[in-house]
Image (cartoon, rainbow, N blue to C red):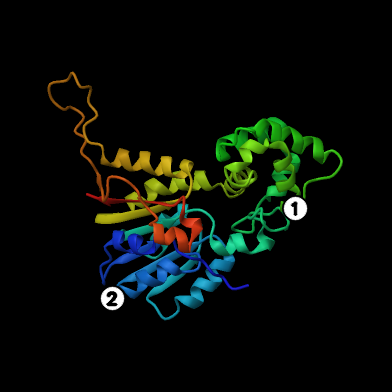
Amino acid sequence: MEFKHIPVLFHETIDSLQIKPDGIYVDGTVGGAGHSSEIARHLKNGRLIALDRDPEAVKIARERLKDFPAEVVQSNFKDLDRVLAERNISAVDGILLDLGVSSYQLDNGERGFSYHKDAPLDMRMSMEGPTAADLLNTFSAEELADLFFRYGEEKFSRRIAENIVNRRTSKPLETTTELADLIASCVPAAARRDGHPARRVFQALRIAVNGELDSLNEALDRAFECLKPDGILSIITFHSLEDRMVKQRFKSYCTGCICPPDLPICVCGRSPRGELLFRKPIEASKEELQENPRSRSAKLRSIKKL
């Protein structure tokens, strides 16, 4: 199967990075190299370091970027500071993080990311560690309910979790279709109008299996610290948990004095470390939504380091 990924907010993202021909840039989630290829095309004497934790993405990206001033590294983007240090790069001009799951991972049934295709319940981006099936068949009902509610904001989390535990007493859950059908049986018909009933649980499992929010939490400060003055960090999120974390962290970088308002003068000496490139996140246009429905939840936020 061809590694195909349609980059969302493509032109908006490239524009946000304000690419310098001699700059150094990092794509922390290279995927099918869509954004990376365009970044590299803007470079003359510059350099691109592209990361991905998925070995299949790394293999394809290396082939697609072989004629560009780019290096592709298999690594989680939370370790980008280490990757740069190993290459004696102290700071960069721009960093891009396109979060979430790629079109290839969704469309490749064998990976188990999609509830539309029958496949083993895997969901691992790096192909290492416990699978979604491992979690579903070992976690208690309370642990599963907490996972579904915390990472998927699933309001029927407890009912779904209890049915999973009851079901696995006779047979372990092994495939995406088994799980999707079980979830659908737990969700009232009225609630099914808001997208596929399995959507939130599949999202929660994917986030948990890959430690996505923990990785993002670690990566944000490290990425911002790796920027040169006037360097730009652009992040595309796909669900509210990611976006809320990015929004709050960007706000903290842009916050100056934190002294109590009743003090006559500032004593904390804190100054803003960044400024937002746009006040509200950029979202997909109507034209992009028609061409690529998966862009409907995408939000782009960008910050410049002062």
Q: What is the C-alpha distance between the residues marked 2 and 1?
A: 49 Å
Q: Position of residue 157 (x, y in %)?
A: 65, 34
Which numbered marker is on residue 175? Answer: 1
Which residue sits at x=42%, y=44%?
243
Residue at figure coordinates x 53%, y 48% from the top left: 212
Find residue 109 and report its horizontal and vertical position in percent. Answer: 67, 62
Q: Front-most of 252 and 242? A: 242
Q: Disc 2 marks which amino acid?
A: Asn
Seen in the picture, residue 92 relative to 245 is either above or below; the reply is below
Most distant residue in the top direction: 262
Location of residue 69 (image quadrant): bottom left
Query: Which residue matches tag 2?
Result: 45
On residue 205, which mark appears? none
Q: Position of residue 96 (x, y in %)?
A: 38, 58
At label 1, counting other C-alpha atoms closer than 10 Å, the crowd grade (few under 14, some 14-19, many 20 or more) is some
As drawn, the residue found furthest toward the bottom would be 67
- Is residue 221 in sight in this rendering? yes
Report the amino acid beneath label 1. Thr
136, 164: nearer the viewer: 164
